Image: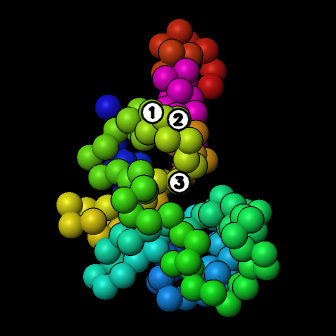
Amino acid sequence: MKTVRSFIEKSGAPKPRTVRPEESISLALRRMKRYNIGALPVVGKGNKLLGIFSERDYSRACCSKQIQSLDLGRPVSSIMTPVKQVTYVFMDTTIDECCARMDAKKVRHLPVVDRDLSVVGVISMRDLLHAIVSGHQIILDNIATSMGCPT
């Protein structure tokens, strides 16, 4: 069964984009725009996962009755999802398990961590869809080849 490790190694994914808790919401949003991503793991010393900052966190803060006017200079930590509420995975987690966790928790991004909770990557719903479709294409190509059909 395909694991997060095999997906990350095959994709040649770059070092994960992260944000520190004291960095501004504005900086985090610009970073997300620049890299075309929807979430950033919030990390502390040693790249330890402290939480996640996502488009959903931002939209909820904008619509919150407690926050009349969202100051984009505020630290990310003021609106991030804290680590206790973050769904994350390890390198040996299967792709199927990632899909199940995303569905159960209604999230679109999973930080990938080592056993010390240091962030080593992020896997998104888009990544999982690509992995699943690629896997099916390989199977279809093998069936076609075995039947003597051109691929």
Q: Would you place residue 89 above or below residue 94 in this image?
A: below
Which residue range is magenta in the image?
A: 130-141
Q: Is residue 36 visible?
A: no
Q: Quadrant of the C terminus?
A: top right
Q: Is the magenta region chiefly helix, strand or loop?
A: helix
Mark 2–mark 1 distance (CA, rounded to whole Å)? 5 Å
Mark 3–mark 1 distance (CA, rounded to whole Å)? 12 Å
Residue matched to label 3: 109
Q: Where is residue 37 shown, x and y percent of the image?
A: 63, 64
Residue 78 is labelled as none
Residue matched to label 2: 103
Residue matched to label 1: 100
Mark 3 closeness class: few <14, some 14–19, many ≥20 residues within 10 Å: many
Residues at badges 2 and 3 in contact (C-beta under 8 Å)?
no
Q: Quadrant of the N terminus?
A: top left
In the picture, measured across the screen, residue 38 lies left or right of residue 65, that is left
Q: Amino acid at mark 2?
A: Asp
Mark 1 closeness class: few <14, some 14–19, many ≥20 residues within 10 Å: few
Q: Residue at x 64, y 81 (%)?
A: 25
